[in-house]
Image (cartoon, grey):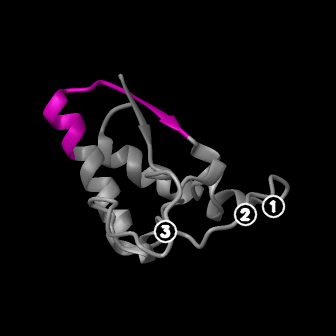
Amino acid sequence: MLDVVANHSTYYIDADCSNVIPLNKCEYYHTKCDIDWNVQWSVENCWLAGLADLDQSNSYVHDYLLNWIANVVQKFDFDGLRIDTIPEVPMDFWSEYTAAAGVF
């Protein structure tokens, strides 16, 4: 079993994203905003506890996350995933992510 997070990658980053490897461009993240838990768009696009929120609609981020999970599951022969922060990512992303992983 592997515990994964596909919502955010690091603690607060400012205008310089170059130190976040491999997702080192600010365009890979949503603009910083605080979550309004009563608004689903805000839940999916704002930053949880100050953590830089990945933009899964960005093609590089999208493909990186799908390739990463497929490779790590295969390399280490995991048989399942526990996915953290599911409500904070658009639901349509999860079907692709779990298909790429190929495990429950």
**Which residue shows up at 50% across the image and 51% down it?**
11
Q: Nearer the viewer, residue 77 or 103?
A: 77
What is the residue that sits farthest to the left in this orientation? 75
- Decide if residue 79 is on the left or right side of residue 34: left
Find the distance from the CA under tag 1 to the CA under tag 2: 5 Å
**Which residue shows up at 80% across the image and 58% down it?**
36
Helix, strand or loop at mark 3: loop
Q: Nearer the viewer, mark 2 or mark 3?
A: 3
Amino acid type, callout 1: Val
Range shown magenta = 71-84
- Residue 23: x and y in percent read 33, 63
Amino acid type, callout 2: Ser
Find the distance from the CA under tag 3 to the CA under tag 1: 19 Å
Helix, strand or loop at mark 1: loop
- Residue 80: x and y in percent read 36, 26
**Alpha-carbon neighbours of circle 1 within 10 Å: few (<14), some, or many (≥20)?**
few
**Which tag, 3 or 1, sits closer to the chain's start?**
3
Membership of 33 in magenta stretch:
no
Residue, disc 1: 39
Q: Would you place residue 38 above or below residue 79 in this image?
A: below
Q: Quadrant of residue 77?
A: top left
**Which tag, 2 or 3, sits closer to the chain's start?**
3
Residue, disc 3: 29
Residue, disc 2: 42
Q: Which of 78 and 4 is in front in this view?
A: 4
Q: Which of 8 and 14 is in front in this view?
A: 14
Query: Looking at the figure, which quarter contains the C terminus?
Result: top left
Q: Would you place residue 60 above or below residue 91 in this image?
A: below
The label number, if any, that marks residue 28 in the structure image: none
Q: Would you place residue 55 above or below residue 77 in this image?
A: below
**Alpha-carbon neighbours of circle 3 within 10 Å: few (<14), some, or many (≥20)?**
many
